[in-house]
Image: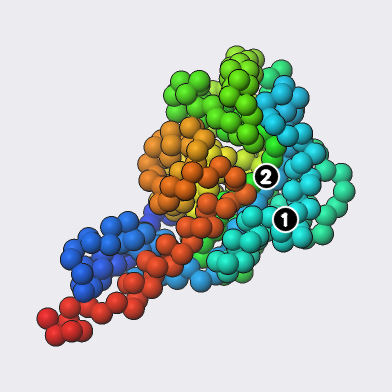
């Protein structure tokens, strides 16, 4: 149960509306349940929005950006400076998520919650808690207060989306090295063996994986994150952009906005948010299954099933944006299909 005094309260989905929505789906000209996950999506969207005919025409992507001190341990194929370069790329509208978001009619909101980039970049929301986390291999990535501040940034962004009438938000991120804290979070909160959770991230050589695992293991030994306290885990072995996404999840669920979870980093944020407030789980849709091995473990821990399997591991929210048409299809089917009564049966 959420007790962080963050000004959010997540309600249960509207059970009566979901029952009415299921009855509507059952009346459509098709065998019962034959549209599979699309029916489940439509019914959950109905419960989220409180109406049998939900809409997902107003869409957004939030890309949280932050850097990681643990990159100094050689866990990434790229230096931290790439985070700032990619923020400029987002600003220019030339990154993969920009291209896909334009195709899907989604607005992209890029937020600098914790990068090391010193320059102001046009179109980037500046909400920096600090210039990157500390090296979690030698001490906590950040303080509890800093983690809370980053969560607050995400909640504020979600409230803005609510005012803009957004109905679905995709979680995106950019932060060189951030599969390392994501794997650490997954290991602590799921209890799954660490070595089975470590992936190649930005594309490190297979020979580097044991070193990456050793760095994460050292971070866990040094910091001793408490698996019963998700905020403690987030602060000690997490990231500022991950914390920002935790806030987006909490704020979006509080505002009745559906959330499309992207890959392993967004998944780690969703897992933390779910441990802080279990009711957010009903608002989450797993867009795809990442190639990062920790992702499936994270989704299983939340109780989510991926809609797509495209062998992606880019991040940025790309997989989440690609799932938006599936949500739209569910809303169109329930609204536009004939019922058996319409055709005289």
* Residue furthest out toward the right: 119
Tell me what residue is drawn at x 55 percent, y 69 percent: 58
Q: Secondary structure at mark 2?
A: strand
Left or right of 89 in this view: 50: left
Tell me what residue is drawn at x 44 percent, y 24 percent: 192
Q: Is residue 249 above or below residue 116?
A: below
Q: Position of residue 212 (x, y in %)?
A: 62, 22
Question: Which comes before the other along the chain, label 1 or label 2?
Answer: 1
Say which residue label 1 marks: 90
Look at the image and tell me whether residue 311 can be seen. Answer: yes
Tell me what residue is drawn at x 71 percent, y 24 percent: 74
Q: Nearer the viewer, residue 199 or 250?
A: 199
Q: Position of residue 97 (x, y in %)?
A: 63, 56
Q: Is residue 191 above or below residue 320?
A: above
Q: How dense is the environment of label 1, judged by Cα within 10 Å: few (below 14), some, or many (20 and up)? A: many
Q: How dense is the environment of label 2, judged by Cα within 10 Å: few (below 14), some, or many (20 and up)? A: many
Q: How is the image coloured?
A: rainbow
Spatial CA distance of label 1 from label 2 is: 10 Å
Tell me how many marks there are: 2
Q: Secondary structure at mark 1?
A: helix
Q: Position of residue 33 (x, y in %)?
A: 22, 60
Say which residue label 2 marks: 174
């Amino acid at each position: 149960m959420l007790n962080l005094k963050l000004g959010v309260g997540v309600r249960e989905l509207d059970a009566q509306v979901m029952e009415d929505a299921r009855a509507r789906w059952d009346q459509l000209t098709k065998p019962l349940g034959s549209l599979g996950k699309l029916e489940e999506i439509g019914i959950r969207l109905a419960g989220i929005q409180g109406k049998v005919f939900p809409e997902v025409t107003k869409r957004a992507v939030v890309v949280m950006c932050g850097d990681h001190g643990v990159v100094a341990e050689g866990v990434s194929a790229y230096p931290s400076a790439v985070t700032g370069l990619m923020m400029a790329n987002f600003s220019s509208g030339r990154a993969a998520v920009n291209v896909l978001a334009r195709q899907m009619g989604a607005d992209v909101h890029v937020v600098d919650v914790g990068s090391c980039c010193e320059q102001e970049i046009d179109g980037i929301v500046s909400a920096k808690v600090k210039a990157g986390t500390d090296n979690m291999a030698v001490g906590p990535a950040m303080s509890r207060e800093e983690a809370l501040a980053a969560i607050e940034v995400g909640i504020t962004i979600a409230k803005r989306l609510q005012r803009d009438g957004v109905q679905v938000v995709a979680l995106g991120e950019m932060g060189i090295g951030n599969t390392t804290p994501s794997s650490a979070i997954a290991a602590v909160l799921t209890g799954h063996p660490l070595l089975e959770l470590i992936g190649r991230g930005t594309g490190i050589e297979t020979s580097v994986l044991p070193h990456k695992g050793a760095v994460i293991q050292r971070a866990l030994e040094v910091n001793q994150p408490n698996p019963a306290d998700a905020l403690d885990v987030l602060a000690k072995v997490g990231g500022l952009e991950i914390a920002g996404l935790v806030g987006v999840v909490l704020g979006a669920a509080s505002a009745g906005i559906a959330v499309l979870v992207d890959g392993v980093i967004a998944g780690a944020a969703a897992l933390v948010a779910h441990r802080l407030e279990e009711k957010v789980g009903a608002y989450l849709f797993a867009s795809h299954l990442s190639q990062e091995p920790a992702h499936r473990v994270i989704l299983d821990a939340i109780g989510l099933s991926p809609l797509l399997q495209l062998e992606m591991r880019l991040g940025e929210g790309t997989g989440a944006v690609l799932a938006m048409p599936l949500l739209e299809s569910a809303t169109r089917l329930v609204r536009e299909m004939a019922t058996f009564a319409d055709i005289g049966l």
